[in-house]
């Protein structure tokens, strides 16, 4: 063993840090004889030298070795950590390595680093403390009382995710620092505790965008509170927030509630001409996530610009429910991107009973010849949706797409037909293509689809 240490010392003298790492790995190799104390002490000294003088890669490798050299490495690592004249990077590595030692003397050193150091070092110290779990909570809670260290202490507590952090974090949810409030609310939202919902509700009116957004997100995953708090009523004003990102988060949150009241609030936002395009698209997606029949009807209404109340003879309705007069207001000038998103959302429906309804809507839209679904991209999206839904009732309308004037629409129609059931559909096409009375373009489309098959 002394031979290996001598080689390590020679490597250190030449500043050959990769060779030093190899030597030290042999000292702590499994199955080897337990090194004597003076050998371990010398190995630690050499490793600290590599940590101080090597480059980033050298430090990365030596960081894997130091914890294996035993608790004798703790004091030298703390000394490096507290050396304000040392470079930031080796001190950063020292903090990171100390996280491997579950010893009481480590926590005060890391706490001290949070209190007195630059941001990069404070952050790694907080993260390292968080890795200690409950043993570090008391020290971090103490740091919350000091303004300079509060942000990093909050971030560290937030990573522990144990019930013991609830009380300390509740003390900073109204802190003057935005980052502290955000971190506290984000962490608290992970717990089911009666003290937390009132905090989230209060944060909906916070002056900081990031705080409102985090509060909206947290309430959106608490659908069980809807009956108690009327979450739609609470979140609806955030759909009109001054910041678009908050509006989008509110749409997502309301969609997660999966109720008819939530769908109605989203539809009201969607049909408002002042709603920005990005928010319209997010609202369409949220209606899709709602996974209710009413939400699908709202998407249909948005796409064709009218409700079943005012559909013209021969146009598609397929609705089991008559919308109210206020719901049936005409939607003018719906953006093609929104139309395309609605078509895509129909194809993402997963509930079996709703897949049937989504397929009916998509089929009806293509059969109804409404102007909103005439653009090639909309037809493509509807064809793709019908393929994803896998409803054999779409067979006829998809076959008709094979005669479309747009080549991409024909290809999408052919791809969707394949997904309906290869053997049955192919047999149907082979039978139809032989008919003499078939429209030439449709005949050609069928032939190409069979060839692609």
Image: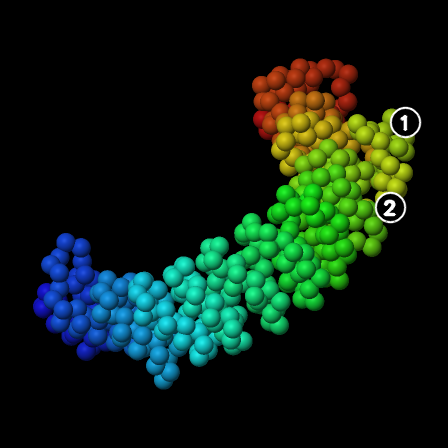
* Occupied quadrant, residue 27: bottom left
- Taking the image as shown, residue 39 lies to the left or right of residue 178, namely left
356 over 215 or under it: above or below: above
* Occupied quadrant, residue 53: bottom left
Query: In the image shown, does 163 or 385 lie closer to the viewer?
Result: 163
- Residue 130 position within the rendered picture, expressed as x and y whole percent measured from the top left: 43, 62
Q: Which residue is mark 1?
A: 313
- Residue 293 position within the rendered picture, expressed as x and y whole percent measured from the top left: 73, 33
Query: In the image shown, does 196 or 385 lie closer to the viewer?
Result: 196
Mark 2 residue crowding within 10 angstroms, few (<14) / some (14–19) / many (20+): some
- Residue at 77% in and 22% down: 439
**The N terminus, quarter of image:** bottom left
Query: In the image shown, does 96 or 138 lie closer to the viewer?
Result: 138
**The C terminus, quarter of image:** top right
- Residue at 69% in and 43% down: 227
- Residue at 63% in and 53% down: 197
Furthest residue to the bottom? Answer: 85
Describe the element under mark 2 as helix, strand or loop: loop
Tell me how far mark 2 sits from mark 1, CA to CA: 20 Å
Mark 1 residue crowding within 10 angstroms, few (<14) / some (14–19) / many (20+): few
Query: Does label 2 or label 1 sit earlier along the sequence?
Result: 1
Q: Which residue is mark 2?
A: 332
* Occupied quadrant, residue 63: bottom left
- Taking the image as shown, residue 169 lies to the left or right of residue 122, namely right
Q: Are marks 2 and 1 in contact (CB under 8 Å)?
A: no
Describe the element under mark 1 as helix, strand or loop: loop
352 over 209 or under it: above or below: above
212 over 332 or under it: above or below: below
Instruction: For residue 148, say whether it is visible.
Output: yes
């Amino acid at each position: 063993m002394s031979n290996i240490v001598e080689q390590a010392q020679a490597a250190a003298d030449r500043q050959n840090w990769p060779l030093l790492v190899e030597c030290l790995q042999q000292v702590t190799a499994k199955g080897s004889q337990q090194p004597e104390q003076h050998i371990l002490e010398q190995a630690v000294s050499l490793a600290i030298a590599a940590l101080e003088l090597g480059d980033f890669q050298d430090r990365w490798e030596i960081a894997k070795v130091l914890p294996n050299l035993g608790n004798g490495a703790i004091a030298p690592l703390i000394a490096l950590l507290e050396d304000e004249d040392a470079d930031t990077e080796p001190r950063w590595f020292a903090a990171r390595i100390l996280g491997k030692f579950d010893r009481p003397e480590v926590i005060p050193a890391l706490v001290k680093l949070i209190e007195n150091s630059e941001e990069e070092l404070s952050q790694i110290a907080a993260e390292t403390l968080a890795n200690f779990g409950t043993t570090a909570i008391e020290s971090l809670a103490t740091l919350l009382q000091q303004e300079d260290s509060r942000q990093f202490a909050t971030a560290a507590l937030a990573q522990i995710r144990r019930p013991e952090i609830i009380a300390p974090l509740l003390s900073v949810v109204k802190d003057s620092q935005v980052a502290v409030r955000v971190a506290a609310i984000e962490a608290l939202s992970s717990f089911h505790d009666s003290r937390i919902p009132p905090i989230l509700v209060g944060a909906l009116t916070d002056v900081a965008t990031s705080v409102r957004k985090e509060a909206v997100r947290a309430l959106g995953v608490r659908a069980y509170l809807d009956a108690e708090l009327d979450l739609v009523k609470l979140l609806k004003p955030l759909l009109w927030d001054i910041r678009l990102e908050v509006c989008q988060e509110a749409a997502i949150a309301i969609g997660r509630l999966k109720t008819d009241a939530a769908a109605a609030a989203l539809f009201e936002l969607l049909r408002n001409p002042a709603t920005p395009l990005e928010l319209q698209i997010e609202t369409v997606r949220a209606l899709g996530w709602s996974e209710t029949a009413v939400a699908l009807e709202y998407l249909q209404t948005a796409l064709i610009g009218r409700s079943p109340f005012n559909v013209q003879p021969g146009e598609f309705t397929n609705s089991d429910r008559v919308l109210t007069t206020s719901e049936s207001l005409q939607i003018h000038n719906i953006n093609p991107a929104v139309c395309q998103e609605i078509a895509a959302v129909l194809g993402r429906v997963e509930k079996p009973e709703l897949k049937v309804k989504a397929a009916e809507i998509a089929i009806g839209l293509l059969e109804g010849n409404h102007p909103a679904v005439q653009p090639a991209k909309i037809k493509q999206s509807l064809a793709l949706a019908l393929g994803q839904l896998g409803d054999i009732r779409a067979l006829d309308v998809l076959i008709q797409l094979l005669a479309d004037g747009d080549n991409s629409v024909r290809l999408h129609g052919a791809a969707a037909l394949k997904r309906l059931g290869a053997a049955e559909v192919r047999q149907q096409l082979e039978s139809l293509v032989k008919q003499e009375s078939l429209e030439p373009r449709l005949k050609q489309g069928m032939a190409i689809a069979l060839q692609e098959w």
